[in-house]
Image: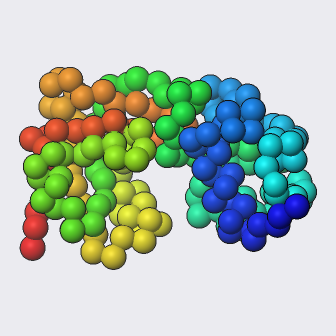
Amino acid sequence: MMKLTKTELAREIALILRHEPERLDLVMNDDGWVPMESLLTGFEKMTPYQITLEEILDAVTNANRGRFDISDDETALRALVGHTTEKVRYKVIEPPSQVLFRVESRRHYRSLSEYGIQPMRRKYTEIFDDFGAAIADGKRRRIKTPMVISILARQAYHDGTVFYERDSSIFVEDVEAVHLSMEED
């Protein structure tokens, strides 16, 4: 049996919960919750890794980086964002304000100004109705040369952009460049 470091285990769990729950034969609810025991059983039966429930809890709490949510009684776990699996449901909403925000690296300026926000590897992109929350998210994602993008949300919505909500967070699949306001130095 193989052992994983705490960081490797956290990454492996994030990959499975976000993209490949079927790899461990996991049944998750619409909000993405999976029983800890099912996760442990899945690892034991379907991977070469030898892990314990304590190692899972340690990995997801200490190597977290905002990836996971653990139930109060520590019997269930879910990945917070970045899902590509269809098993996690997002609610369609109207944008809560006229302008929403996202922080990206300045090196993406040209791509954003041509193509807008695209899903890339993830199905949805998180956006914020609070400028400070967008800045904090950019810092959490360790963006070295940050650029704040203002999304003309109401206009985008009326032109067909779909906005989603999950756990009080706002997401989009894509936003056309015409609905973005960016300033380059």
Quarter assignment of residue 109: bottom left
Marks counted in the figure total 0
The image position of residue 60, as x and y in percent, is: 72, 59
Kindly tell me whether residue 17 is visible in this rendering: yes
- Taking the image as shown, residue 8 lies to the left or right of residue 71, namely left
- Taking the image as shown, residue 54 lies to the left or right of residue 141, namely right
Quarter assignment of residue 31: top right
Colouring scheme, one of rainbow, by chain, secondary structure, one colour: rainbow
Q: Residue at x 44, y 65 (%)?
A: 141
The image position of residue 164, as x and y in percent, is: 40, 30
The image position of residue 150, as x and y in percent, is: 20, 51
- Comparing 183 with 42, the one in front is 42
Q: Residue at x 88, y 61 (%)?
A: 1
Residue farthest to the bottom, as pictured: 144
Rendered view: 15 above or below 64 = above
Rendered view: 154 above or below 131 = above
The C terminus lies in which quarter of the figure?
bottom left
Quarter assignment of residue 159: top left
- Taking the image as shown, residue 47 lies to the left or right of residue 181, namely right
- Comparing 90 with 6, the one in front is 6
Kindly tell me whether residue 75 is visible in this rendering: no
Rendered view: 185 above or below 91 = below
Rendered view: 67 above or below 42 = below
Q: Residue at x 18, y 32 (%)?
A: 156
Q: Residue at x 68, y 68 (%)?
A: 7
